[in-house]
């Protein structure tokens, strides 16, 4: 009877691993999407990918994966906006940007050096 129990647990583990592989593949597809994808398109792609998570996980899983993929899409778009804003500020004030980068590097290096001496 213990052998049957172990076989059932092993089969359940294999099914979980398969569903995790599908979920990771869905996330990879969402992250590899071109930067021109709008939030609505990323949300629609996430909804499509979330339907294929697993037959035994139901609607709760669908909502979680859709929300996660939507959040990743929104975060990616926000990050791109921040990077574009920083790039325009560096172009507008190059000398200040160089001084700020040097100062930040100096602070990080001094903290790192103090941490290694202790």
Image (tube, grey):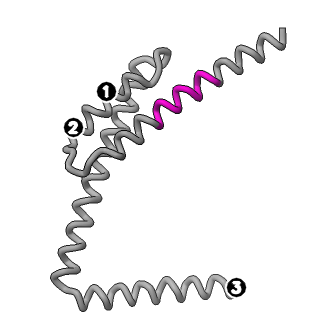
- Residue, far top: 1
Front-most of residues 78 and 84: 84
Nearer mark to the viewer, of 2 and 3: 2
- The residue segment tinted magenta is 14-24
| Depicted 5 relative to depicted 48: above or below | above
Q: Residue at x 30, y 52 (%)?
A: 76
Q: Residue at x 40, y 23 (%)?
A: 52
Residue 105 in the image, given as x and y percentages of width and height: 44, 85
Question: Residue beneath label 2, please?
Answer: 41
Front-most of residues 118 and 58: 58
Q: Are marks 1 and 3 in contact (CB under 8 Å)?
A: no
| Depicted 29 relative to depicted 88: above or below | above
Give yes or no for residue 20 being in the magenta stretch: yes
Front-most of residues 84 and 63: 84
Q: Residue at x 24, y 72 (%)?
A: 86
Which disc, if any, is residue 118?
3
Side of 85 relative to 3 (left or right): left
Residue 61 in the image, given as x and y percentages of width and height: 43, 25
Which disc, if any, is residue 37?
none
What kind of secondary structure does the magenta stretch mostly adopt? helix
- Residue, far left: 92
Residue 69, quarter of picture: top left
Figure quadrant of the C terminus:
bottom right
| Depicted 10 relative to depicted 28: above or below | above
Determine whether the residue tagged by mark 2 lies in a helix, strand or loop: helix
Alpha carbon distance from label 2 to label 3: 51 Å
Question: Residue beneath label 1, please?
Answer: 48
User: Callout 1: few (<14), some (14-19), or many (20+) C-alpha neighbours within 10 Å?
Assistant: some
Alpha carbon distance from label 1 to label 3: 53 Å
Residue 28 in the image, given as x and y percentages of width and height: 41, 42
């Amino acid at each position: 009877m213990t052998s049957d129990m172990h076989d059932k647990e092993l089969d359940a583990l294999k099914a979980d691993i398969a569903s995790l592989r599908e979920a990771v593949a869905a996330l990879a597809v969402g992250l590899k999407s071109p930067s021109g994808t709008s939030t609505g398109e990323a949300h629609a792609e996430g909804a499509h990918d979330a339907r294929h998570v697993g037959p035994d996980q139901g609607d709760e899983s669908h909502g979680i994966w859709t929300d996660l993929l939507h959040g990743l899409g929104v975060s990616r778009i926000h990050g791109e906006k921040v990077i574009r804003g920083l790039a325009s500020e560096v172009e507008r004030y190059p000398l200040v940007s160089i001084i700020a980068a040097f100062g930040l590097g100096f602070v990080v290096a001094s903290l790192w050096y103090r941490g290694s001496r202790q």
